Image (spheres, helix red, strand yellow):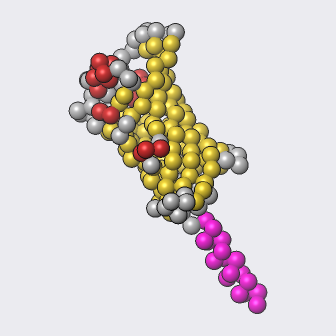
Amino acid sequence: MKNTTLIFALVISMAVSAQSTWKSDGAHSKVGFAITHLMISEVEGHFGDFDITATATDTFEDAEFTVDITTTSIDTDNSRRDDHLRSDDFFAAETYPSITFKSTGYEKTGDKTFTLTGDLTMHGVTKPVTLEGRVNGVITDQRSQKLKAGLKITGAVNRLEFGVGGDTPTLGDEVNLTINLEMAQQ
């Protein structure tokens, strides 16, 4: 009887901690950023074309992320500025068409919060970064009957460390990231 109970407990614990694949819902997700301009204002923008995949439990814990962002999809609500950001002065989008992130660590920091570490590659340079995350909730979508998770991930990177743009007093060096995600379990 003890062996049966032990096996049952082991099977249940494996089922609870099983990992599955989750994909970002592009219609309900946004990869945004903000940077200081002239030391007096903040300019915001986002990337419209991205693919974010995660493996995580049904409660969206122990997550591992892979991110691929298309640099030409940058949008700051100003086409002239966007063209300049795509140029060799900044992202060199023809040479470096993607910004990628691959997580290397996940640490739960609270009931709904976590720290995510990983390697960010931008403009041909790869550096480790640390991001803060929050799971806003996990529900069963009534339409698809699949689990969906809402997340917010934030952090900051120094653009100069990645060779994006030059050292100038008109732009801040730090770029703040805000990624709002709706992830669907596959």
Q: Position of residue 2 (x, y in %)?
A: 76, 87
110 sits to left or right of 19: right
Asked whether the viewer can see residue 175, the reply is no
Q: Quadrant of residue 163?
A: top left
Q: Is residue 138 magenta?
A: no
**Compared to 95, does 166 lie above or below?**
above
Q: Quadrant of residue 167?
A: top left
Residue 23 or residue 165, whichever sits in front: 23
Could you tell me how many numbered marks the image carries? 0
Q: Is residue 11 magenta?
A: yes
Asked whether the viewer can see residue 100, the reply is yes
Q: Quadrant where the N terminus lies?
A: bottom right
Q: Residue at x 45, y 36 (%)?
A: 31
Q: Which residues are magenta?
A: 1-17
Q: Given the current orientation, which residue lies at the most extreme right position?
A: 2
Type of secondary structure dominating the magenta stretch: helix
Q: Residue at x 71, y 87 (%)?
A: 4
Q: Given the current orientation, which residue lies at the most extreme front position?
A: 143
Q: Residue at x 49, y 61 (%)?
A: 144
**Compared to 143, does 91 lie above or below?**
above
**Compared to 38, does 7 lie above or below?**
below
Q: Residue at x 67, y 82 (%)?
A: 7
**Compared to 31, does 87 lie above or below?**
above
Q: Position of residue 165 (x, y in %)?
A: 35, 20
Q: Position of residue 174 (x, y in %)?
A: 49, 23
Q: Position of residue 152 (x, y in %)?
A: 56, 40
